[in-house]
Amino acid sequence: MSNNLQKKQKIRYRIRKKVSGTAAKPRLSVFRSNAELYLQLINDESGVTITAASTRDKDIAAQTGTKTDKSKLAGSAIAKKALDLGVKEVVFDRGGNLYHGRVKAAAEGAREAGLQF
């Protein structure tokens, strides 16, 4: 594992010590690869993924625009799925990434679609 990955892993563990999701307030987890962005709502008490969205979903991948634009669409998509399931509040887990760029765009998209965190 490279030094940068080790640093990111330490940050991820530090965040996960403090952030945990419940059934009433699940954790909105972000995974950012070089090309895509994946979002999951997770109940950590039972260890279950409630719902997920990503920039690879057909309706989002078909859109034209930058990766940041698609990340915002993914954020609003997971917010719509969460609201359909009756979840209004979440805990945001940036997954060791800086709150900047695609991660920030996804969070703003989710907020604009009605999620609170």
Image (tube, helix red, strand yellow):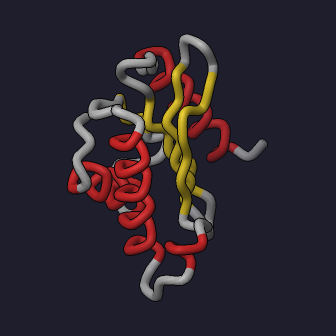
Q: Residue at x 56, y 24 (%)?
A: 13
Query: Which of the pair 59/54 is nearer the observer?
Result: 59
Query: Would residue 84 be found to the left or right of residue 115 on screen?
Result: right
Q: Where does the C terminus fall, quadrant-wise?
A: top left
Q: Check the image and report above or below for 44 versus 62.
A: above
Which residue reaches farthest right?
Answer: 1
- Please give the name of the residue rendered at 44% of the width and 18% of the height, measured from the top-left corner: 23
- Which of the pair 16/98 is nearer the observer? 16
Q: Is residue 60 visible?
A: yes
Q: Would you identify the image quadrant in which residue 83 lies?
A: top left
Q: Position of residue 97 (x, y in %)?
A: 47, 46
Residue 75 x, y percent position in the rendering: 39, 56
Answer with left or right where residue 32 lies relative to residue 71: right
Q: Position of residue 54 (x, y in %)?
A: 55, 59
Q: Seen in the image, is 59 located left or right of residue 112?
A: right
Residue 1 x %, y %:
78, 42
